[in-house]
Amino acid sequence: MSVTAPAGFTAAGVAAGIKDSGGPDLALVVNEGPSRAAAGVFTANRVKAAPVLWSEQVLRGGLVSAVVLNSGGANACTGPAGFQDTHATAEKAAEALGHSAAEIAVASTGLIGNRLPMDELLAGIDTAAGELSRHGGEKAALAIRTTDTVHKTAVAERDGWTVGGMAKGAGMLAPSLATMLVVLTTDAGLESAELDKALRAATRTTFERVDSDGCLSTNDTVLLLASGASGVAPGHEAFAEAVREVCADLARQLVGDAEGASKDIRIEVTGAATEDDAVEVGRAVARNNLLKCAVHGEDPNWGRVLSAIGTTSAAFEPDRLDVAINGVWVCRGGAVGEDRDLVDMRYREVRITADLAAGTESAVIWTNDLTADYVHENSAYSS
Amino acid sequence: MSVTAPAGFTAAGVAAGIKDSGGPDLALVVNEGPSRAAAGVFTANRVKAAPVLWSEQVLRGGLVSAVVLNSGGANACTGPAGFQDTHATAEKAAEALGHSAAEIAVASTGLIGNRLPMDELLAGIDTAAGELSRHGGEKAALAIRTTDTVHKTAVAERDGWTVGGMAKGAGMLAPSLATMLVVLTTDAGLESAELDKALRAATRTTFERVDSDGCLSTNDTVLLLASGASGVAPGHEAFAEAVREVCADLARQLVGDAEGASKDIRIEVTGAATEDDAVEVGRAVARNNLLKCAVHGEDPNWGRVLSAIGTTSAAFEPDRLDVAINGVWVCRGGAVGEDRDLVDMRYREVRITADLAAGTESAVIWTNDLTADYVHENSAYSS
């Protein structure tokens, strides 16, 4: 049901001719109100694409009436001219929709370093504006794909109000936001500050704990728009939980569609002294290329888990580390544990648990295996 | 010429039966004196193999009379029993050579988490002791290989004294020592403190700036043994330079033989505010899997260089970054520069220069491309 599941939103997805393939490449999501409160979280990369710089500025005002998203070009590392392109995009949408450009967020994804074909993009905005519909959420989700093999949507329905969302992302998936564009919508009636609080809490334990390939994008954008059309103002806990549910659902879908991956790896770090320790260890394991290769080969290589843990500054003693792969404790006390031949790694989801025996905190990080297909997709294709 | 190039050293390499393949797998390097001064640098991984824990202890005494090295097993994550195996190895060599076990260093490489076949290993020490020779350096270098396709040796000859060395390492090559075993020898007459100073200075700008795959080993060991047999005590500068020359030569050979690699990538960061900034940026670029795939595909993808730089805390402004690939400045001022079609990436060595325009410091980091062969070698082979 995507971004049009909550009341008060329309959307469209069209083929504007930005992509050489001729596939859908431009999406429009419009908040029809009555409220236009919004919040956003953006990439931690210091090299930020023009649409990120623009949308950060828009979000400072706390109001978003529409989002223009395009695939087929990231508009990153394009200099002042690229920023002008984003500005022109917002102005065009403002004109087509009768809103102020200062309330139009823009998000782009695709190749870094190329200018966007602005004639096609601006004409596409008119086309999309003409196709806006209460049922346009699916088409919008389809139009923001790059190497995504499927479109990603999620919905959390509550008593009288709803949170919906769409996401794209298949490579450059790494912490401080996986490479991705996400638009979340809700018909709950909440102010920007409340949206911001719920969105930051949700991304911290969902999108920010996906680390597919360790590469942090220049374009990551997560937006949350509230229309207030339900007339309901849910409590903070209930709202935050619904936003977290949708984010977790979309994050899991991103991992499941990562470029070239054959395994989704869930790394749970337990017994940590602090949550930060657990996250640091989880990330170190998630970024270990040798382990990722071993998982691809269905080899329960716990030695590579230990050597990754050893690179962190987390509190632990090497001779107290336990590691389980798919439930079999192949490493006990930093040395050989149960028989590794008991580990069954045939299925796509692989669960690695590392117990640091240093406390009671924990965290889960998701990553993927490293495959020849990943290499092929990212060497043969300039993305 | 290897470790027996300097006067006062003998060595041997034998097939002890540690490897299933039956290839050479045990090396012995003996300092025949008159001096036995030594220095060592070990992995920064907090999960340290038994031979690392043992040899760190030996080096605290500042004297090493012999080094036993084996391939075919890392003796890492093997618990107290594994440490006893290393101790027994040193005792056996001490007995065979008539030295104290407290002056016998041990180094191992191979699969993590398996006990070594001690019957074969101990018998091999006797065999090796019987084959010690002034010309045994090459055989020793051959016996420490794991997935290395060639053995690595280097020599720096000076006026009346010499520094020689051998190295192994092909995967798990990452900072704070590439995964590797290195033994350096010299006939210079210098004390342990002087050796230590020269060795640390040399490794800091050579082995510690090789980052083949971002994976830090549990077994990295670099030893420098001085026999004093030349009767010459060179000055600090001259000696440090000779040690650096041999380390740089061996480090370059490690990069050139990295598992599955088809390109050696030299990343030079210039215009940095501090050397630390330059190293941080170089490492971030070296560890970017997407860039490594692009180089494999001979795609001068400077956008991936910028997105890697953007993840660091180094001083820079995004719109002042310049990037050259093989001498062509494809990125100027954070945006498109010269025509990327001018970049010729057919050859094995690829040079990336990133100018931060923030100061006068610089650093060079070496890495490799990411290939399907790397994935295959590390997923099909439990190492």
Image (cartoon, coloured by chain):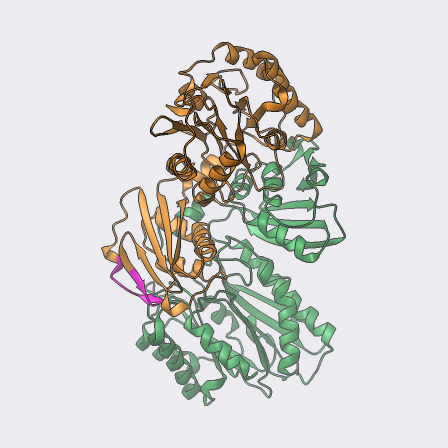
Chain colours: A orange, B green
Q: Position of residue A261 (x, y in %)?
A: 39, 39
Quadrant including the N terminus of chain A:
top left
Q: Which residues are magenta?
A: A330-340
In the figure, A1 relative to A301: above or below? above
Q: Is residue A334 above or below residue B62?
A: above
Q: Is residue B24 visible?
A: no
Residue at left offset 55%, top offset 19%: A18
Q: Residue at x 68, y 85 (%)?
A: B231
Q: Is residue A335 covered in magenta?
A: yes
Image x and y of residue A28, in percent? 51, 19
When asked about the image quadrant of residue B236, the answer is: bottom right
Q: Position of residue B306 (x, y in %)?
A: 62, 40
**Front position in the image: B59 or B167:** B59
Q: Is B362 placed above or below B372 here?
A: below
Answer left or right for B378 relative to B103: left
A266 within the magenta span: no
Q: Looking at the image, can residue B238 be seen?
A: yes
